[in-house]
Amino acid sequence: MAPTSAPAPPREWRRHGRPAGERWRTLVSGLGQTLVTAGVVLLLFVAYELWVTGLFTAHDQDRLADQLATEWSGGSPGADAPVVGTPTSPAAPGVGEPFAVLHVPRLGEDWSRVVLEGTTEDQLAQGPGHYVGTAMPGEQGNLAVAGHRVGRGSPFLELDALRPGDAVVVEVADGWFTYRVLGAGDDLAAPDPNGVPGRQIVTPDRVDVLAPVPGGAADAAPAGAYLTLTTCHPRYSARQRLVVHAVLEGPGVTRADAPDGPPALTED
């Protein structure tokens, strides 16, 4: 019997010149290489956001701290005449200018950040930024400050670690103002007499947290001296905002009365 010839390969095999299985292996290999490359790029981006931008911000913070030290040593604490025995609330600075230092002992014994005026990316890339138009340190109303949760030094990375009664100390040219995180016991949701809780998680459009009485009307009269800290939530997302509220504890202390700062600076 005459040998039977092998069947002709499918038309598409002949058209591409190689078996379908080989083409699939090539396709899968190429896809795998693309995914690996994308993963490397993503890791490099995360490294840049977490560490490289942090180095830039650390450099900016050192520069701003030196700037404040020079200005404060010149003896011009603010536009208003100081009240004997109490520090002076600074005059409203220009956008981008440093004017205070934030100390949060709960976040570390030496945790401190220079605060700039303004909350655009230009300011937040250098450190926490003060919402223009909100109260200044020590004033009645709401001193509101924003900061990055992740990247640009991650100043508010662990803002969720704050507990009721924790101190947030704001240093100005001639002294310190101490604010205490609101809440009762371990309950950060417990409101004060004005209905202000210690912590909220809100959507980005909830600008009422910046009102003179947080949560109230923007044009309401102040009913206390509050401090509000805001940052993105959850980590690595801007879907919501984590908001912490504190209230001023007493009139503050001057450098003359407490050269090393208030006792709250050394709290655990």
Image (cartoon, rainbow, N blue to C red):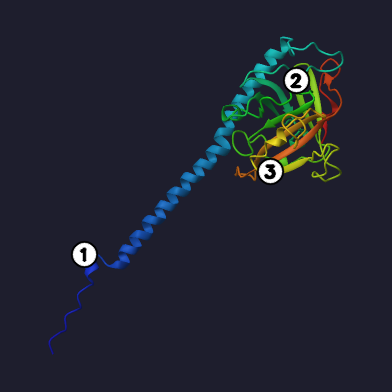
Above or below for 128 versus 17? above
Task: Measure the C-alpha gap from mark 2 to mark 3.
Answer: 30 Å
Above or below for 23 versus 218? below
> Label 1 near label 2: C-beta < 8 Å?
no
Quarter occupied by the C terminus: top right
Task: Measure the C-alpha gap from mark 1 to mark 3.
Answer: 60 Å
- Sequence order check: which comes first, mark 1 or mark 3? 1
User: Residue placed farthest to the left in the image?
Assistant: 2
Quarter occupied by the N terminus: bottom left
Disc 1 on helix, strand or loop? helix
Residue at image position (85%, 23%) is: 251
User: Residue placed farthest to the bottom in the image?
Assistant: 1
Give how far across and how far down residue 89 sits, in percent. 77, 19
Q: Which residue is mark 1?
A: 15
Disc 2 on helix, strand or loop? strand
Callout 2, which amino acid?
Answer: Val
Callout 1, which amino acid?
Answer: Arg
Q: Which residue is mark 2?
A: 172
Rendered image quadrant of residue 151:
top right
Residue at image position (66%, 25%) is: 132
Task: Measure the C-alpha gap from mark 2 to mark 1.
Answer: 78 Å
Q: Residues within 10 Å of mark 1 (few under 14, many from 20)?
A: few
